[in-house]
Amino acid sequence: MATRRKLEASDSDNTQFSTSTSSDTMRPPTSSARRSPFLPTRLEAQLIAIYPITLLLGSIFSTLSPSTRSAPYSASLQSHPTEFAPSYFAQKKNVFNVYFVKVGWFWTTLAFTFFVTLHPGFGQGASARRIRAVLRYGLVTTWWCFLTQWFFGPPLIDRGFRFTGGQCELLRKSDAREDMSNTREYITAATCKAVGGTWKGGHDISGHVFLLILGSSLLWLEFLPALTHVEGLRDGRLITLPDGKVASVAVEKELVKEEGEATARGVKFALGVAGLMWWMLLMTAAYFHTWFEKFTGLLVAFAGLWTVYFLPRGASNDIRITPALLDAKASTSHGPDDKVDELTIKAAGTNFTLTADGMSYLFHVDTKTGDLISDHFGGPTTDFTPPAKINPSGWVDKLGNTRREFPDIGRGDFRLPAIHIEHADGDTVTAFRYQSHEIVDGKPGLPKLPATYGKVGDVTTVIVHMYDNVSDVSAALSYSIFPRYNAIARSFSISNNGSSDIVIERASSFSTDFPNLELEMIEPYGDWSHEFQTVKRKIDYGETSFRSTAGYASHLHNPFFTLVSPTTTESTGEAWGLQFGVDCIRVAPGATFQSPEAVGVYSSNGVGGMSRSFHDLYRNHLSRSKFTSQTRPILLNSWEGLGFNINETSLVKLAGEAEEIGIELFVMDDGWFGVEYPRNNDSMGLGDWTPNPAKFPSGLRPYVEQVNKFNILNSTTPLQFGIWVEPEMVNPNSTLYKEHPDWVLHAGKHERTLTRNQLVLNVGLTEVQDFIIDSVSRVLDSANIQYVKWDNNRGMHELARPSDDYTYILGLYRVIDTLTTKYPDVLFEGCASGGGRFDPGLLHYWSQHWTSDNTDASNRLTIQMGTSLVYPPSAMGCHVSAVPNQLTKRNISIEYRGHVAMMCGSFGLELNPSELSAEETALIPSIMAEAKAVNPIVISGHFYRLAHPDVSNWPGVQFVSADGAQAVVFAFQQSYMVKPAAPPLKLQGLDPKARYSNDLDNATYSGATYMNGGLNIPWPQGDYQSKLIWLNKVTANGSQAREAPIC
């Protein structure tokens, strides 16, 4: 769904911001209305219901079966005599009873130990989840021991037997009573039978039923959350991968081969034990005990399970030890004497302090209301500070003047809510109250949604559980702190535990209040070929909202903005950056809505510091592609050089020209496919992903093999090949549309409007997802294809249901996740008529995105500067195109065009080399060498905006290597001016005490000189001039820390 961002400056001078997502009716299968938190969830209830149903079926069988009904049954032996047993399983000495049921707790313990020790779903070592599981096992085992083995003397079952009038038959004899006068109070069923007595006369709870239900339930309740994507079974959505990363349980399906034989055997063994226990329970129900004995065995088993698994959920807030403190203690490696500032997340009771290297985020629970109260989001603090009183209440209720973390609606707070739920009776009031919390080392994933990730040591998460006991709706608020980046990732889930549908009208993943601050907002806007322009305005009274209705981020508004103080600059002052993740929501079939993730970053080093935090966070903890940290091949794309006029001959010729100038990757763009409807223009062929036989008579493989025969310049490495696709679209003039017109997004009989002569496939449909996966896989399998440019050239129209766009996005994520997993060595680049879909959701899967269809270098400089507010330059794609530019008709030197393009992670050419001028041809080798030399520092270095083209005629940017030993400066002159002269270009990010040599004047200066005095660049006459300047740190002995590249 489209994310709607809203800002409010309220009457109380309390600035509130949030990200909001609208949704449709949730239709969760639920059980009884207004369910108590002490009762199991619907899914747990379904699981538990298996046991009484099994006992009922067994009892019915024993009643209706002629052989069982007519067979003699001994009440004292609680079984059929061996010679009259109606079945092998009706004999007490059957092998399963003797070697499995009689020692059932041994098998339960063995299965539990194997699974909890080996399965990655419990994390590594003494993780919080593993410790909690072991504690639960210990409590259940204690209950088993008290009932069947010992309870300060005879076990509870034997005590109950004697309490109901039963005793050992030996005690009925007078001499036996006299001999055992001192011990008969302690005699048990086992000792009675051991001395030849008969245990009879009282009510004998079925120990078999008790043990089999207790043991198998323990196993199922521990195993299912880790093995399957089942909502409602405690914390089963979270798993820690073998490499330490925390993700959704859904990834377990992809880990089967990676888990190893030991883990696989542990899973099978545990499931085998639980399954055999259920079978033996059915046999017990059919052949042993009376119905009442079996029923009481069921009750005492359920009593223990309820006490261990369900009672803690509804415990009073005063009982902090359940399960919050257990989680907090178990999930961190910190001892009780550790200092507060050594903990990333500290919970002092219900006062929460989230600490990063240069940021603190504080909130607490109001002990009277159970509300979460915002305390601080900004620079680091050392003490817990309760919120100041905002304003006298006046006619506005006190709640409306409270800084709330998760504000609702309808209870006196007239500001924007973070959550707005409409219930079945029309009631829109929801009152969430704190219930418990847990602290997790690492970060839970979001099922079916891309999100940031991190292993233990990189990120810590606190999950706050809240509950509204009137509407029977629960919420789980997740706060993940990334200390190195001063970043916090927030999301929440809403679970409907009632019996009726609910409608989530508004859901804001990140909502907080700033106390009495003068703030301004910087936000990107744009259009096609005009992406990521920025505007700055004051946060004032009223509501400011941004929304894309295109079905994705779009060129118009990217899901990001930053808040700054009026004095904040690029390098100084406070800045809060908010990135709202993906433009969709998730409504799980089992009753839970998961909000998309929102990321907040705080910087005390200006807007630039905020940007660098986003860059590092997204490169290290969002993008999962292996190419994210790798240098990218220099490519040549055929589009602007050849357009649709391509065939095997023209493309091989272009590839040969590419080889001669040092191209490493040759990309065939649009126009290569379509059989019945050949793709000779944009009006036909989309959807028919088969090579056009007129253009490629023998298919792609022979053609690609010809391309691979070319070598990269001055090497024996084959020239790589890439291809363009637009799999989410279809032309009406296509075989696919003729066969499946129902596969496109459409609203009943309304006209299906065309954009660029194409319609949008409904990727929310599983059959469409499978078609795209199969089509792209068939293309990639057909030849040695190492790069895919994935395009998307229109927005969504005619949605039949409000939910169509979010199901579309979820379907797209499934498609992309499947393909990137299947083809990890293929470099994917996203595109949507330029930067229309440059968002963190796709950055999670694809390491680079085409930034704009506008390749005019002057315009591109502004676009790339704006994009860098939140996205790393390493994720941008930029090409040198021909002049005059197709859009602007502007002539710009090839050096300037080259320098602008090589500021991006993916550098390339989009032209026909044979049409270059002699002067341009002569300069190409040096430009290619420069691009290759700077790419490593662009990929992994820190980016600084030195001067913006909107405010300076001499814009510039700078990259500093991760180790600080090297820097590269890109400086530009937009137009030549006689007066005034260009000011010195002040650098950033250097060590002020270190010395750096530069290749502009071949001199060496201190870092302080470069940053405070600046570089004086002698600009020649003429518009659109550019300079690339290298700086290298000089070591104590006078040598350079790293050799300057030879370009």
Image (cartoon, grey):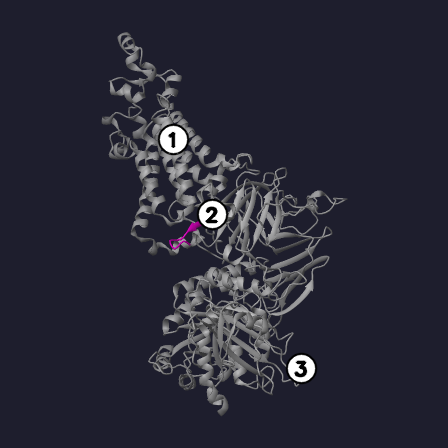
- Asked which quadrant contains residue 58, the reply is top left
Q: Amino acid at mark 1?
A: Thr
Between residue 1013 and residue 51, name the one nearer to us: 1013
- Asked which quadrant contains residue 651, the reply is bottom left
Of labels 2 and 3, earlier in sequence is 2
Q: Secondary structure at mark 2?
A: strand
Return the residue at label 2.
440
Return the residue at label 3.
980
In-image side of 170 versus 138 (left or right): left
Between residue 910 and residue 85, name the one nearer to us: 910
Q: Residues within 10 Å of mark 1 (few under 14, many from 20)?
A: some
Disc marking residue 142: 1
Q: Nearer the viewer, mark 2 or mark 3?
A: 3
Between residue 753 and residue 383, name the one nearer to us: 383
Q: In the picture, which quadrant includes the C terminus?
A: bottom left
User: Whole-Å distance between the Cαs marked 2 and 3?
Assistant: 58 Å
Q: In the picture, which quadrant includes the N terminus?
A: bottom right
Magenta residues, as a range?
A: 237-244
Residue 849 in view in this figure? no
In-image side of 810 versus 700 (left or right): right
Residue 324 in view in this figure? yes
Task: Name the residue at 61% across, 78% down.
Answer: 954
Q: Nearer the viewer, mark 1 or mark 3?
A: 3
Where is residue 666 shown, x and y percent of the image? 42, 79
Give the residue furthest to the bottom.
918
Task: Name the residue at 24% across, 18% down.
Answer: 196
Q: Nearer the viewer, mark 1 or mark 2?
A: 2
User: Whole-Å distance between the Cαs marked 1 and 2?
Assistant: 27 Å
Tell me if label 1 and label 3 are in contact, CB under 8 Å: no
